[in-house]
Image (cartoon, helix red, strand yellow):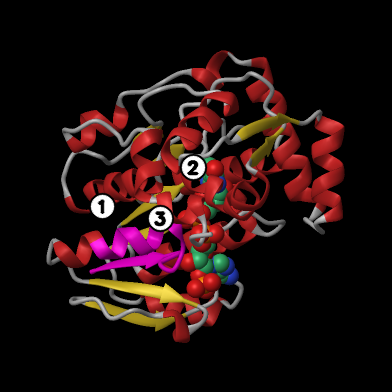
Amino acid sequence: MIVVIGATGHIGAELISILSREGVAAIAVTRDERRTPFLPGIQWMTADLAEPASTERVLRGVRDLFLLTPNGENLADLQIGAIRAARGAGVERIVKLSALGASDHSQSPIGRAHYQAETELLNSGLKWTILRPHVFMQNLLEQAPTIVKEGRIYAASGDGKIPFVDTRDIAAVAAATLTKPGHDGRKYVLTGPEPLSYADVARILSEVVGRPVEYVALSLDEARGRMMQAGAPLSTIEGMIALAAYQRAGGPTALVHDTVERILGRPPRSFAEFAKDHRRIFQGPPQ
Ligand SMILES: NC(=O)c1ccc[n+]([C@@H]2O[C@H](COP(=O)([O-])OP(=O)(O)OC[C@H]3O[C@@H](n4cnc5c(N)ncnc54)[C@H](OP(=O)(O)O)[C@@H]3O)[C@@H](O)[C@H]2O)c1
């Protein structure tokens, strides 16, 4: 039995759909049972990683755990708690969703928090696989209302090139690592097929929506100000600014890795494919 934590999010929702289609039984975890679509072979359970008793309850008798939590001050605490609870419950293997550049000397609190959780997992004595994806294509969906209203996307990454990855491909890799042999003790960096600047992203979106979409290159200070105005938590702001600074500098953040293709036996989705699949959202309602 596989437990999926993060099952209502971008990656987790796609992961449980894949497991369901492949006939793999799984327990999908949410804190809010009102958000639970019916999927054959998927059993929903409620748990909150902030409440150890509920975490232990969903992990009892389980062999494999997919562990994902959102960015936030408590990312490392929640994940370390889940790893300890899993070991206590007799779980054998954890596939952990981490992030590109997770390290103890990352300028981003998100990168440092993931590294802390990775270290706990590596020292846990459990079997493990770590997935370190690059920037999600799906992040652009958050800008869809602005793209519709203003014909603009805003980012602070300068001309930096980023091989954005589709969360559907991350989920497919997660499913493969959970259900097929040969992935224990591996750290996988997951990228899309091509490094793109936000100017490239704007050009592709313009072609797909049939209207001009312009890239507005923000300075780091402008980006910080906008996030503060939107009420984002300070750790998120610090993390996003650090990541944008890495992307502006280029180098490792622009590198394409062939991991998705090696594991899935097919190329990762391109940004153009992602944009076409979400065309209606980026176009907005008919005028
Ligand atoms: N965005 C990027 O470009 C990017 C790049 C690399 C790595 N990442 C990493 O990707 C992860 C986010 O993935 P995502 O976008 O798929 O997530 P998401 O869509 O934000 O979903 C978060 C999931 O976590 C669950 N969750 C939240 N708090 C929980 C708690 N206390 N106990 C149990 N479950 C909890 C939520 O479930 P309920 O609300 O239903 O309870 C939801 O299913 C983060 O760790 C981030 O660092 C992101």
Does residue 9 belong to the magenta stretch?
Answer: yes
| Residue 117 is at least partly visible in this image | no
Instruction: Spot the residue most to the front.
Output: 287
As displayed, is residue 30 above or below residue 81?
below
Identify which residue, 244 or 75, lies in the foreground: 244
As displayed, is residue 47 above or below residue 81?
below
Residue 139: image location, x then y, percent = 55, 47
Mark 3 to mark 2: distance in Å?
Answer: 10 Å
At mark 2, the secondary structure is loop
Q: Taking 37 as reference, is 100 left or right?
A: right
Q: Taking 268 as reference, is 51 left or right?
A: right
At mark 1, the secondary structure is helix
Q: Look at label 3 and name its amino acid.
A: Ile
Q: Look at label 1 and name its amino acid.
A: Ala
Locate the N terminus by quadrant. Answer: bottom left
Identify which residue, 50 or 86, lies in the foreground: 50
The earlier-in-sequence mark between 1 and 3 is: 3
Mark 1 to mark 3: distance in Å?
Answer: 10 Å
Start-end of magenta stretch? 1-17
Whether the residue carrying mark 2 lies under 8 Å from ligand 1 is answered with yes
Q: Residue at x 77, y 49 (%)?
A: 235
Q: Residue at x 53, y 51 (%)?
A: 141
Whether the residue carrying mark 3 lies under 8 Å from ligand 1 is answered with yes
Mark 1 to mark 2: distance in Å?
Answer: 18 Å
The label on residue 136 is: 2
Residue 170: image location, x then y, percent = 36, 45
Q: Look at label 2 and name its amino acid.
A: Phe
Q: Which residue is mark 3?
A: 11
